[in-house]
Amino acid sequence: MPVSFSKASLENKYDVIIIGSGLGGLTSANRLAYCGYKVLLLEYHTQLGGLATWFKRKGHIFDVSLHGFPYGMVKTCKKYWNKEIMNSIVQLKKIVFDNPQFHLETTFDRLDFTEKLNKQFKIPASTIDAFFSRVAGMNFYDDQSMTTRELFEEFFPGRSDVHRLLMEPISYANGSTLDDPAITYGIVFSNFMNKGVFTFEGGTDKLIGMMTDELEKNGVTICTSAKVDRVVIDSGIVRGVEVQGKTIECGSVVSNSGITNTIYNLAGKDAFSDEFMAKADKIRVNNSSCQVYMGIKKEDKIDDIGDLLFTSTAPEFDSSELCDFTTRSKTFSVYYPKTRPGHDRYTIVASMNSNFADWDNLSEEEYKKEKQNLIDRALVDLDRYLPGAKEKMDWVEAATPKTFNRYTLHTQGTSFGTKFEGLDISRKIFKEVSGLFHVGSVGIIMSGWLGAINYGVIVSNDVDAYMRSIA
Amino acid sequence: MTRDAIKDLILEIIEDIDEDADFDTLESDKPLRDQLDLDSMDFLDIVMELRKRHKLQIPEEDYPELATLDSCVNYLDPLLKDA
């Protein structure tokens, strides 16, 4: 069991210290333990998982970021975690879109999307094929000058309905907009289109529990309530970390605490060259989120309205409308008893994209009032799909960008890391400070559950190469 | 290590990555990626495994050398000569 830092009896030195236990941090810890290193994982919160988190209220378990990931997660969990984790991955078969431009139900894979685009949207089969081939062939080292908007205009000129179908889910998945590089869209969209949308049976709590067991089995030391104050750097080389006045030595630090946090707060900008800082200063963090968590009474049931609903009453898709303070666009993730077999409860989570500044500038009273308004809008919108559901609820509460900031410490509460430029900085940080690595949502493509885990593996490879080079 | 042993080593590593990989029809001069269900993450696994087993450091710019079974053997042969 992970222990609280104040009660832990730690050694003075580890090979690698991981700061933060998001999926990237957890995976790096596991990979590096597999490579034979003595690993210490430090988490600021009392619970592991970072944004892959959950909370319990009145018998309900609410998942914060378990909304659906691509099929690639199966292979990734098998290779970098274990078969038991892999075997808990199941498909979400009913994805619903409802907006003034169209209504449809889909399995969200290439086959079904091809049919919908052809029959419902009247797009020629050859255009659809050409589009799929183009996005499937995209790589992150390709030309980045084309935006997603330009990509869509090339294949589906003037078709704002098609643009909406293609973009809306991805905006919720990683906070990207039509103005981000087309390659970030292509890579993520193709991952989903491979076989559809999948989830973890048993919920986030079960997944993180299984990962924790695996880490402990592999000898990783885990501490919670352990906020790292700074990374100790001497002559351009990492020497350790400082936690609550105590220094713990190590050969490498893997920071899973956000790239901006890592640079400005943990290492301090003086640790980097002017050239590097000029680039780092330009990193844009992605937007944050608002969520409304709704729990249905134990004795009550709701109809099957789909697993994931992309809903909006805005006439057309508009990336900035999605982040608006009173956006008319939101997703509903519906968790039926099948989500947690044996637990047998129904919960619904409404998610919206949101900007930190809109919530940060409110007085305490305004903040409370706006949170209630947020809840009320979600209930009104949900009523279109589940009339009367409000009467069946015995728990409703909301989270805002400030909530995300409080629990994850992410700059501006970002729920999707950074824009594209963050990836290059994250990949090169160890070339600036020997032994300092970053893992976490960056560059849009290394975001989401699958992106975070795979990035944890990629960074572990760098750490292993470095550790062996100094051995 | 002989060239055959290196070949076996690579196949063994790939089998650990994908136990369903079919080696019977594998053509050693054609890209592994096209013949087996391997993606860029799998190639990273091969790199990590070679480092773990034989302390080999393969720089990122050399990753293309691992494209086919033949090119793997050619690239690793001098490096694993004394292994």
Image (cartoon, coloured by chain):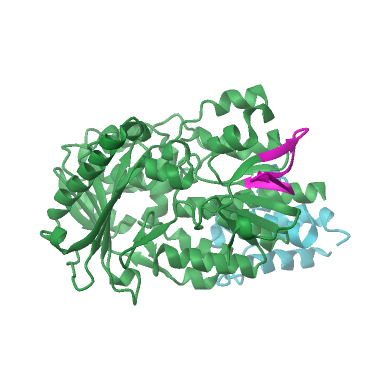
Q: Quadrant of residue A146?
A: top left
What residue is drawn where x is 17% and y is 51%? Answer: A379
Q: Position of residue B67 (x, y in %)?
A: 64, 53
* In the foreground, A401 or A77: A401
**Magenta span of residues:** A231-254
Residue at point 33% right, 46% down? Answer: A172
Of residues A101 and A150, the one drawn nearer to the viewer in this rendering: A101
Spot the green chain and give its letter.
A
Can residue B73 be seen in this snapshot?
Answer: yes
Q: Quadrant of the N terminus of chain A?
A: bottom right
Q: Could you say which quadrant of the image residue A68 lies in?
A: bottom left
Percent x, y of residue A120: 17, 50
- The residue under the point 11% across, 60% down is A388
Q: Quadrant of residue A100?
A: top left
Question: Is residue A295 found left or right of B21 in the rendered image?
Answer: left
Compare residues A396 and A290 and report the one nearer the observer: A396
Residue A237 magenta-highlighted = yes
Secondary structure that dominates the magenta span: strand
Which chain is rendered cyan in the image?
B
Q: Nearer the viewer, residue A235 or B76?
A: A235
Percent across and percent down for residue A149 are 33, 33
**Image coords of residue B43 (percent x, y):** 62, 55
Residue B31 appears in the figure: no
What is the count of numbered marks?
0
